Image: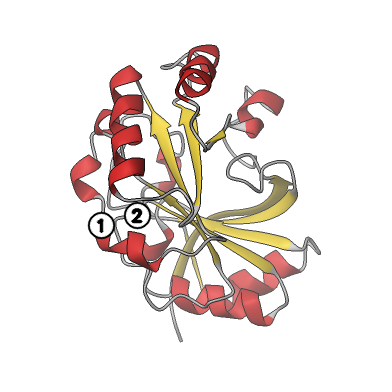
């Protein structure tokens, strides 16, 4: 029987990505191979409650919400995450996978929508980007850049152009909480006429004092 470590399972409002604003059940898996400077879920980097993919999928589907996201930590740090995703798809959910982009997304169920970080220099983890993942993305998937500075913004623009991301997949830019003024990022994007989405972390606006269960 496959082993899975889960930090929490809960229903909330999707706070990030092009699906922001929709009710969503989250399965937050424990463990992560990276240590981003702006990480807001450090409690999920280690451990978690030991369970099985079957039990986790059953609990999440029981909430009765159409959208289910598997997040972390880093979900693909646990090989059994692939089995969990399959079970959620079989259960009829609209499944999102939020991943840090350092593990290959090859072999994921085709029904799963990938929301993949591209780590900027300001994250401290840019060397961990697995660039071969770009070729596996579809128009329904998404990449997101979390920006800690104007330098991160300029770097992200270069990546978007060099990797020909516009038209390949959805793209969003998000200010790292407390590090980039959202109004400044919006102004940069308007000035440069970027064909990408401005993204705030909606859950931080709705529940600014909470870091779990949102």
Residue in the foreground of this view, choosing between 173 and 58: 173
Circles 1 and 2: CB atoms closer than 8 Å: yes
Q: Position of residue 129 (x, y in %)?
A: 26, 50
Which disc number belongs to residue 119?
none
Q: Distance between the residues labelled 1 and 2?
A: 6 Å
> What residue sits right under mark 1 in the picture?
130
- Check the image and report above or below for 207 versus 103: above
Q: Quadrant of residue 62?
A: bottom right
Q: Where is residue 168 in the image (x, y as percent from the top left)?
A: 45, 57
Q: Determine if residue 52 is in view.
A: no
Q: How is the image coloured?
A: secondary structure
Q: Which residue is drawn at 71% across and 27% down?
A: 206
Q: Which of marks 1 and 2 is nearer the N terminus?
A: 2
Q: Where is residue 50 in the image (x, y as percent from the top left)?
A: 47, 67
Assign a secondary structure to mark 2. Answer: loop
Q: Determine if residue 160 is in view.
A: yes
- Check the image and report above or below for 210 versus 52: above
Q: Please state if 78 lies on the left or on the right of 184 as rendered.
A: left
Assign a secondary structure to mark 1. Answer: loop
Question: Which residue occupies the extreme left position in the image?
Answer: 127
Q: Residue at x 49, y 53 (%)?
A: 167
On-image quarter of the C terminus: top right
Q: Which residue is drawn at 62% across and 46% down?
A: 18
Residue in the foreground of this view, choosing between 172 and 203: 172
Which disc number belongs to residue 101?
2
- Check the image and report above or below for 158 versus 67: above
Q: Position of residue 109 (x, y in %)?
A: 51, 78
Q: Quadrant of residue 76?
A: bottom left
């Amino acid at each position: 029987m496959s082993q899975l470590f889960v930090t929490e399972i809960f229903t909330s409002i999707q706070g990030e990505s092009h699906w922001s604003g929709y009710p969503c059940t989250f399965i937050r898996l424990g463990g992560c191979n990276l240590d981003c400077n702006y990480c807001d879920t450090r409690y999920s980097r280690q451990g978690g409650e030991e369970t099985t993919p079957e039990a986790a999928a059953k609990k999440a589907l029981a909430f009765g919400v159409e959208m289910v996201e598997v997040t972390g930590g880093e979900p693909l740090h646990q090989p059994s995450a692939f089995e969990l995703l399959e079970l959620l798809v079989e259960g009829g959910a609209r499944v999102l996978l939020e991943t840090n982009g350092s593990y290959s997304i090859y072999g994921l169920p085709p029904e799963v929508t990938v929301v993949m970080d591209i780590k900027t220099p300001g994250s401290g983890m840019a060397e961990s980007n697995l660039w071969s993942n770009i070729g596996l993305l579809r128009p329904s998937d998404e990449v997101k850049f979390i920006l800690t500075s104007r330098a991160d913004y300029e770097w992200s623009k270069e990546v978007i152009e060099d990797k020909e991301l516009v038209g390949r997949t959805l793209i969003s830019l998000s200010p790292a909480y407390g590090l980039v003024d959202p109004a400044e990022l919006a102004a940069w994007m308007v000035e440069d006429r970027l064909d990408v989405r401005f993204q705030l972390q909606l859950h931080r606006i709705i529940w600014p004092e909470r870091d779990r269960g949102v």
